[in-house]
Image (spheres, rainbow, N blue to C red):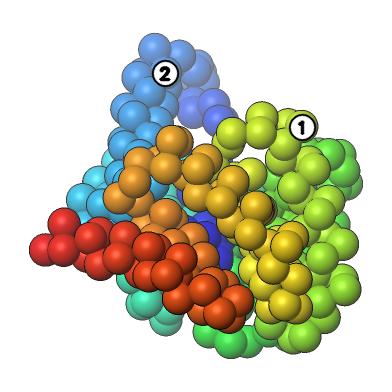
Amino acid sequence: MVKSRKRKIIFAGITILLLITGCSFKPDVAKLAKNEKAWNELSTQVVTLYRKGNYNEAFKIANDALRFAQDNFGNNHPKVAASLNNIAELYRAGGKYDEAESLYKKAIKIDEKALGKDNPELAKDLSNLAVLYRFKGQYVESEKFCKKALAMREKSLGPKHPDVAISLNNLAIVFRMQGKNKEAKEILTRALAIREKALGKDHPDVAISLNNLAELYKGEGNFKEAEPMFKRSLSILQKSLGKEHPNVAVVYQNLSEMYDKMGKPDEAKIYKDQILKMVSYKK
């Protein structure tokens, strides 16, 4: 989901479970591998459905993954935190912010205890909470958690890691919401460069960066810069996620608004009609 995007699904690291056998401790490698595979498959389904915009089915499977993690890894395991994050992301996408906030905070507590306060997995939790606060209009809180996640990722992963781009993108949006356009433009440009190099120029995350940077230019009235970025973003999303994905509709909306501001109602109507077709199709 663009704005937000704005919205990244979390997978936690792997630890080793010990089972008691007689009077000694011994890892049951086969059982561990089987459980990890089953949980990973469920979580992958959640990601796939989420990206397709099928939130109801994603929510059902995300809860299955949470119960599986609790039953097989224990209530304080990072995989439980990852499952809580996934459910929280779905709540956020559905506008249920209070429910999402509660689950994000539970995930943070689990990962702080299990992984330590400097682990990059914890940065994902903080980043998700920052996005939620942005959606709630709590920009000071959002900026604080964005910066904390960014510093943590730069230190542990390096300045050119794709996860650093996630934090940069999130922070840029918060800056823009507060009218800090210069700062937003600088870090959005950096995030785009990181994603293009690390992920490839046709990755959906590149499209998100393009859309957000184009939105900034559109707000400034710099349509010459905004237009090609929006169109490239749209092309990437249509090819990678499909023409009916919610993120595609967001770029349609942004393009229609831009053409209205440019005094080009015919071009604006093209994208408004596309949105109406998507709504009709879903009905």
| Residue appearing at x 64%, y 68% in the figure | 215
| Residue appearing at x 72%, y 77% in the figure | 221
Tell me if 47 is positioned left or right of 171 in this view: left
Q: Is residue 234 above or below residue 88?
A: above
Q: Is residue 250 visible?
A: no
Q: Please give the residue where the numbered disc 1 appears in the rendered image.
A: 197
- Disc 2 versus disc 1: nearer the observer: 1
Q: Are marks 2 and 1 in contact (CB under 8 Å)?
A: no
Task: Indicate which disc residue 33 carries.
Answer: 2
Q: Residues within 10 Å of mark 1 (few under 14, many from 20)?
A: few
Secondary structure beneath label 2: helix
Q: Is residue 269 visible?
A: yes
Residue 59 image-quadrant placement: bottom left
Tell me the amino acid under the disc marked 1: Lys
Residue 218 image-quadrant placement: bottom right
Tell me if 9 is positioned left or right of 213 in this view: left
Q: Is residue 264 above or below residue 140?
A: above
